[in-house]
Structure formats: C-alpha cells, structure tokens
Image (cartoon, coloured by chain):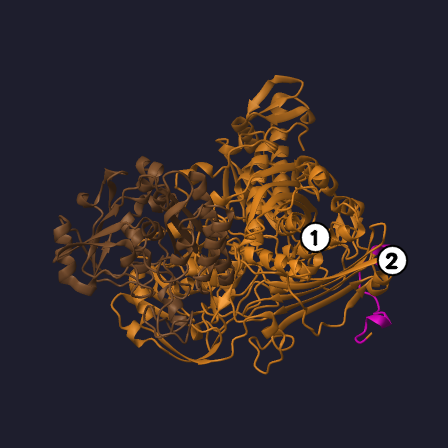
Amino acid sequence: MLRLPDFTFRRPKDLREAAAILAGEGSRAMLVAGGTDLWPKMKRRQMEPRVVIGLRHLSDLRGVSGSPTTGVSLGANITLRELEREPMLLDRYPAVAEGAHSISSPPLKTMGTLGGNLCVDTRCFYYDQTYEWRQSIHFCLKKDGDTCWVAPGSSRCWAVSSTDLAPVMLALNSRLHLLSNSGERTIEAGQLYNPDGIAYLKKRPDEIVTKVDLPPINGDITAFRKLRRRGSIDFPILNVAAWIRPSKKGRVVEAARIAIGGITSAPFLSVVAANSLIGRELNADSIHEAAQAARLESRPLDNTDLDFSWRRQMVEVWVRRTLEDVTRRL
Amino acid sequence: MPDKLNVVGQPLRKVDAAAKVAGRTIFADDVVLPNMLYAKLLRSTRPHARIINIEASAAETMEGVKSILLGSELPITFGILPVSQDEHTLAIDRVRYVGEPIVAVAAVDEETAEDAIRRITVEYEDLPPIMSIPDGVRATDDPIQAYAEQGNIHKTISFEFGETKSALEQSDLILDDTFFYQGNTHLPLEQHAAVAVYQPDGKLVLWSATQTPHYVHRALARVLEMPASRIQVIACPNGGGFGGKSDPFSHEIAVAKLAMKTGRPVKIALTREEVFYCHRGRHPVLMHSRLGLKKDGSITGMHFKTILDGGAYGSYGVASTYYTGALQTTTYHIPAYKFEGARLFTNKPPCGPKRGHGTPQPRFGMEIQLDKAAELLGVDPAELRLQNLVQPNSLTANWLTIRTIGLRRCIEKVIEASGWKSKFRKLPFGRGVGLACGCYLTGAGLPIYWNNMPQSGVQLKLDRSGLVTVFCGSTDIGQGSDSILAYIVGEILGIDPLHIRVVTGDTDLTPVDLGSYSSRVTLMTGNAAIQAAERARELLNDAVAAELKVPKDRLVAADNRIFDSEDSAKCVDFAKAVQLAEAKFGTIGTVGSYKPPASAAKYKGGGVGPSPTYSFSASVIELEVDPQTGIIRIEKVWIAHDIGRSINPMLVIGQVEGSVYMGLGEALMEEQEFRLGVHKTPSMLDYKSPTSMDMYSIETILIEEPDPVGPFGAKEVGQGPLLPMPPALCNAVYDAVRVRIDEIPVTPEKILRALKAKSQGKEGRFGPQSFPTIEYRDPMFILPPWSGGDGRSSAQPEYTRKGL
C-alpha cells in the first residue's frame, strides 16, 4: 500500500495553541481536521509537511448558532454529514445542505469538515497522482516541477478549485473568521480564493478558518447544483450556487448572486449573469439570458474529468437549471 | 446421476461465505510469516527507452535493505502463451511501458523498501513511444518487440469460411461499418499480492492472488530453473479477478527469487496504481464489418476485420486476436464468413483477457450493425435475430459445435418482460429501448500449452468420521467455484455440502485444474467432481448393499445417509457407510477428471473458439438521454441468460448482475487513456467505473434447458451476460435520440456532437471515421460444413489471393 511519510503530529489543547504552533512551525506545518484531503496527498507526496496540527478534537470549532433572521454561524469543524442533515439549513439555506450533500461519499462526509472543504486543495490530472507517476512526466508546476502540463506555455498553475461549499458561500456572501497568533479577522468568502492553482487561498499560511457566518436569509432563495460523472463519489467538474432576493410581492429579482466553481482555479461570481436578472421576473427568457452570460464567462480547461468544451456548454445548462430550482422555491 | 435433486438448483449459502462476511478469509496480503521481508518494485517512468545504467549503490547500503534484484539475474523469459514467452521478470536493457518493473528491493519493512527504490537511479535513452493504433500500424526499423510479424504488428490472422465475396455479392443489402471499443481494465477490489518462502529443504512456496496457480507454477520452474516438483504454488482466494490475475507476473517471480537470495520470507503487495500497470485487460479494438442480408432478412455473409492495440507484451494477445473473430458465427447463421485480425505492440501495459476475452468488442459491432440492418429492412430487430438463429446441435461456418441454444427463449423472454413491442420506436424523444444478444464459451476446448492430459482433476478423500474432502486445483475468485464443488459432491453422496471440506488451488495438494478463466470451472471441475463422487458412491453402495442385504440399485444417498428406496428404515448414516466401505476396500479415495471433447475444427488456428458448449444471453435496456446534456440515465435492464441449469441460482444471478454492472461500466465510462506516454487515471477515483451506489435496476431471467455435456446440465455464466450490454446501450441511445454512437464509452459529449451533426444535416453519428490499411496475411480457406468441408483447410481458391 501507499505509506505515509514520517511527520510529527501535534494535538493542541485549544485554538490559541493551534495558532501558536502554526506560527512557530511556519511552512513546515499543515492543519488537519477530517484528513480526507491531506492524508492521501501525503501518501502521494503531493504535500510533505513535517508537522501536522490536528484540529478535529477542538470543541470551540464546532456548533451551529444564530437564526435565519439574524444570521447563522457554523463552526469550521462541523462535518459535512452534520451539515447536510442540519434542519435549519435544509429549511432556509438549502444550498448549503445541498452543497454538503453532494460532496464525495457518506464515509468521507462523516470525516470531512466545512473548513476542510472550503480550503480543499485544487485538483488536476497531472497533479493528483503518486510521486512515481509525477516523476514520469517530470513533475508539474504545482509540485516539484516547472511546467504546467495543462497549458505548457503558461507561467501559472491551472489546477481546478474543487470545493462544493465555496460557491455556496460566495453566492450567500458569507463571512469567514480567520484566527492567527496575531488575532482574529473576518473576510468575505470571495476574498479567500485566488485564481491560481498553487496559491489558491488568499489567507495567510498562519491563519486558521474557524467559523463561517451565513447572513440573515429572510425571504431570499438559494439553490445549488453539481456536475460530476458519478453521483456516488466524484469531485465536482462544475458546480453552481444561486442566491436570489425576490421583491416582496412577487417574482421580480431585487438582488442576485450566481457563483460557479469546479472549472477554474477559483470559484467566481458571474456578475454579468446575476446583473442580467435584476429588475426582471425569473422566467424562461431571463434565465436563458443569465445562463448564456455565465457560459461566456467560463473557461474550463482539459485537466479534469470529461471533455472541457462540453463542460463549458454545461455551464449554461447548469445555471439554467439552478435558476429553475430557484423559481420552484419562490 | 440422481433423479431427484436436493442440492443442485437450491440457493444455498457459499461454503466460504461465513469467513468472508466475518473478514476472516486469508487473502494473499493477509499471509504473514515470521521474519518476513517486504519487497517493492522500481518501475519504469519512460514509455519506451533503452536502459543505459542502473545505479543502486545508495539503496544497497541503506539500513534495513536486505537484497536488491536486477533483471540480469533472471535472464529467462516467460509468458502465458507458449508463442509469447516475451517477458522478463525485471527489464534488462529496454523498457516498453511506464510501470514496467526494473529493480526489486527486499527490506525489513515496506517503508524502507519504498525509500530504497527512490534512491535508485536509472539512466534511460528515450525511444519514440508508440501509443495508438495509427502509430502502431506505421512501419518501423526498431519495433517494440523484435519477434513481431512486421514492424509493430505482433500477429495477423486471416480465415475464410466459404466464398464470402461472392456470398456478399448476392445480398440485397450490404452494410459497411467501423466501430471502436475502447480498452478498459478489470478493477478487482483486491490488489495483487504474493508471499514467497524458500525452505531449508530447498523447496519454494509461493502464496499469490492468482487465478491460474498451475501456469504460475510452470513459469516459476522455467524462470528460476528449478524442478516444478520443488515448487508449491498456493492460490489464495481472490478478491475478484476478471482475468486480471490469469498471467504469471513479475512480482510473483521477483519475491520468489528474493526469498531464495535472502533465505527469508518475502512479501509484496501492489498498490492500486501498480495493478493498472499489470493490467492484461480489455484490448482497445478498431473493427470494420461488412454484413450482407437478403430482403427477407436472412444473412448472406460477413467480412469482419479487427485491429487490437495490444500493449507492450504478448500476454494472451494472440488468443485475444483469434477471439475477436471466433464467436461471430455462434448466434446467427452466417453462411459465409471471412475474418482478418491483427494485434499491435504499443508502449502501454499489456492487454489480455478481461471478462469475455476478445469477444465483447466484435459482439459490440455486430449487434449494432444488426440493429442498423433491421432499420434499413424495416423489420423489428428482435424478429431479425430470431429469424437468423443458429440451430441446436449444428456446426457453424467456422466449425464450432453448437449443442443447446436457449437464445430464442432468451430473446422472447426479455421482449416480453420489457414490454418491447409497445416501446420500440414508440417512446417519446429522449427515451429508448435497445436489444442485443451475446454468446460465450463454457471453457476453452484446448489447454493453453499443448498436452493430452485432462484439463481438470478432482480427488475425494472419505474419512471414517464422515468428513468428505474435495481436492481440486481450481481457484475461487469470488465466483463460488469452491461451493460448486461442494454442492456437486454433496448432491451425489447425499450429504450437506456445507459439511464438505474443499481444498483448492494448491499445486502440492490438489490435482491440476488449469485455472479460473474462459468460464471453464463449473463445467470442467464439475464433471471431474461428478466422476470422482460417483466412483466413491459406488464403493459406498457396494459396502452398504452387503450390510443391509439390499440390491445396490435400490440404494439412495440423501440427507446424510444411504437407504433402501423401497424401505427407508433400512439405512446407515453416511459415516457408517464410509466405515463399512473402508473395512471392505481399505482407505477410501477416488479421482475424477475431465477433458473436453475433440473439436470439429481441424484447421490450424481452429483451437481458439471450440468449447464443450456455449451460453447465450439477450438483454433489453431502457434508458433516457437528456438531449440538452447528452447524459444517459438507465431506467432498467432486463437480461435473460441461457444457463443450461443453475447449480445455485443465487450465484448465477450474482454473476449476471456483476456482468451487467461491468458491461455498462465499459459502455458508459471506463477508459484506459494515456497522455504524455502515461496512464491518465491509474486510481479508483479518476478511472471511472460505476460504484455500488451507481448501480442500475436489473431483472434477471434464467433460461434452464439442461445441456447434456454440462454437470447436471450447467453452462457458463461468469462472462457471457456482459456481452449484450454495450451494444444494447448504443441501440437504446439510437431509439431514444436517433443518433448512432459507434464507439464506447458513450460519453455525454459524444451524444451531443452526434446530435449537433444531425441538426446540421450531417450524419447523426459519432464513431471512428476510417480503418487503416493493414497487410493481413493471405486467408486460410476452409469450406463450411454445408459446403462439403471436413473441418480442415482446403486448397486456396484463386480469388482469395492478394490483389484479387
């Protein structure tokens, strides 16, 4: 079997100590909660931390608090299994529960966490391989090499953002709490992500994602859809999250956000698509226009499952169907 | 044979079920011996290269490293087929695919062995990699294998059974179609593992996850230059095989040699990625078929051409190539048939046998082509098939003997169960049904190496305690072959099969059975077991008849006793019967063996295709195609299988369902793709195959018409039911959205492309556009049985020569 390399495991007594260890160890250290991303990647030598800091046991990272009218706080250690079954989310923030539900398979959802999914590593056919496999292509830009095999002329890495919850948080405009040795700060979810397959997170390496604040939902509607080959286990090759604020009286859109993930190095808000809906009713025409706009903003590459030009076509279909889900929830 | 069956036909528990569900089965990776070392293989990172130098000194001096094995220490080649002894345990001067083993290291633990491997450097001189069929047919001065027939063309085959060209000329309708069947792999849950120990008495023992301990035994003796009588191979229960554990492998020989060098037990357990490099799976096959029919629907002739992308070594490939032409004739009567096949060497892991071995690919093309023919003729494709069915107890154009054929009932049953007549071409756009059939061997007629001995042997030992032990060389790969032996012996001796001890797959303890491949096990071990058990019962009956003073022919064995059929109070229990027999005859042991009947095909090359009998299957798939995305959703699969007789219907249905899953996986998503000379997705996450949670709804119908040559009438089920799946799927896609997908896997983008082409007024089809020109050899001409042939090749008619 593939074996883990040697490393030191640290079990901090609380978050402060975790932050202190992380600050002290610097780039030698990585955090682990569920481990569904880190452990296999360590076995394949994609990640080679000398120190791994365990967060899973920390109770101050758990729990759901607040309400849909005031906003809901989710601890970063909440498992995906808990998220997909949380009644308040199912009822009022269905996109969050749907996003969590769509991730991987039940055993991995039992281990995987909200914070872990938001920070999950970017993926690529040339990168998610064993050390020996990567050696046979002389490695790639993301790890140990100097060529991005997806776009050999490119100076950046094109690995794909593969989190299902990030687009949901972008669409909801959630806020993330980051803790470090030097204190706590909050950022918008969109500020976490960077369109670069290597430096895909904008948080500082010494910061820990501790909490996610969902804004008050009131009459707002959310929906989420994911494209993957097998419904049982696969990572996204496209996901769409939509947030719509309808007018008090009816179906006219007052505000909208449409987030797209799984096709480039960062999830993004399709601003043109969302704006095209404002002031209009959600109907076949407006939805069609928004979906087309979203497709034009999307440029998937040939580094994950299924044909990339087909995946681009699917952006339009998936945005359309996600908005149709929204209309059914109005 | 008993009149009334007590065991056969019952859905009994498997003899190994309790251990399996309790997690107590000892697989090869569970074998642990004192003082055991762990081995790892350094594998090639180049698809095609000369090895200039191997620098291993940094690994040699590492603490914990006990031995380093290089290819030069094992210069003798091996391979499963006598004609393809082309593999070295470890590459010596050339590597031919990424993943080919070069160095083996034995160390005190797996981590150390892995570290050691990373400290070995190999200096390569790269050679141009040949990665596809178009690459492979091109001429070259430096072929991948020097023994290839021409360039990288490993082998060509050409047969003509009857004057095909003139038969085709008399057709009212001729179809020319090109199809492509992508390569895919077995994906057994258990990864290969082996443990070897070299004992102080100079005897070598190897435990391995193998389907063919007998052939591993022979390969070890050959490469290690040891008498086979000093080597013991023990096949552990396999956690799935599907053909992927049917070759002798480098890792098995390497651990044996390392055990000899170190004097310590040595274990190797492959990673999932390494299993992808062992491969021996489905050949990618490009094929062209010309089919002729009369207006009335009768087939006039067929000319079928195949090109197989074989990978870097021979493996079973020559047989696979023959199989791409062997079974076209077994389902529908083809009066004249020509076949040309060629296998190429390419710089990829070797292809070999996977469930259906070489026959799913041509079956795919043929069953789609029949669907097209039916549409052009304006007839129901089910009717077209029924009209052309091969007759029972007949010979085919290529001299295969068809005994029972339940295909008519298979088709009728799936048509009825699926509501075909109210659905075919009648469902709304986006929804469709498709039909296809298949046929498979119940064991290959000939062994892999030429010999006159039985293909299967069984020994029975009857203990005075009443315990019966069955010894047989067969290997349980999950299909239930151990249980089949117990059921059959239990039926004949009248005892509970779960109380029988079955000892299998051990070359020291058990008589030879050739292995778990070609769907041969139930028929061949079953017939051998029947013979051994009937001989034992004869001895028991002699002794019991004397004791009870009852005529022998009135004795019945059932319910763990032997009794007088006219007065069941006159009885002895089974243990007592054994004691009586032992007192009368001495220690009670019997043997049985089985050898298939001689084939009617006497021509050279006619050894691939003959079987004691054939199984048949028919399937209807109903599905939905989303025309906006091209995504397929399978509504239901109906499949009828001609099993002859189920020894255990529960196991039969399990095999049918497994085949349906595997066939649909191939049809929808499985794909061995290579990029930059490397396997694109050697992991269970990225190599897409349906999981149990993606499984489809299946209705299995068993057609039970006992076949005279099968044990209790049984035929095969392990492979045949896979064959209808890919073509039935493509035919259903056509019914749903009226576009032809002539290649698998049928991915959503292919459907959308075909739909787009159709909307632009072009042909609504996705598939290969052309078939390369290949120098096939001149055909061997054989007259079919109905033209006065005798199964031998005859003088070559003038017109079959090249250029005519």
Query: Which quadrant of the figure contains the N terminus of chain B?
Result: top right
Q: Position of residue A299 (x, y in %)?
A: 44, 64
Please tell me whether mark 1 sits on a helix, a strand or a loop: helix
Q: Position of residue B340 (x, y in %)?
A: 72, 66
Look at mark 1 in the image and give the residue it sits on. Answer: B367
Chain letter of disc 1 in the image: B
Say if mark 2 contacts mark 1, CB within 8 Å: no
Please name the color used to draw chain B. Answer: orange
Chain ID, brown in image: A
Residue drawn at 85 percent across, 69 percent down: B797
Chain letter of disc 2 in the image: B
Query: Which quadrant of the figure contains the C terminus of chain B?
Result: bottom right
Residue type at the position of mark 2 = Ser
Residue B786 is one of the magenta-drawn residues: yes
Look at mark 2 in the image and give the residue it sits on. Answer: B787
Q: Answer with the quarter of the image where residue B66 lies.
A: bottom left
* Bounds of the magenta segment: B785-803
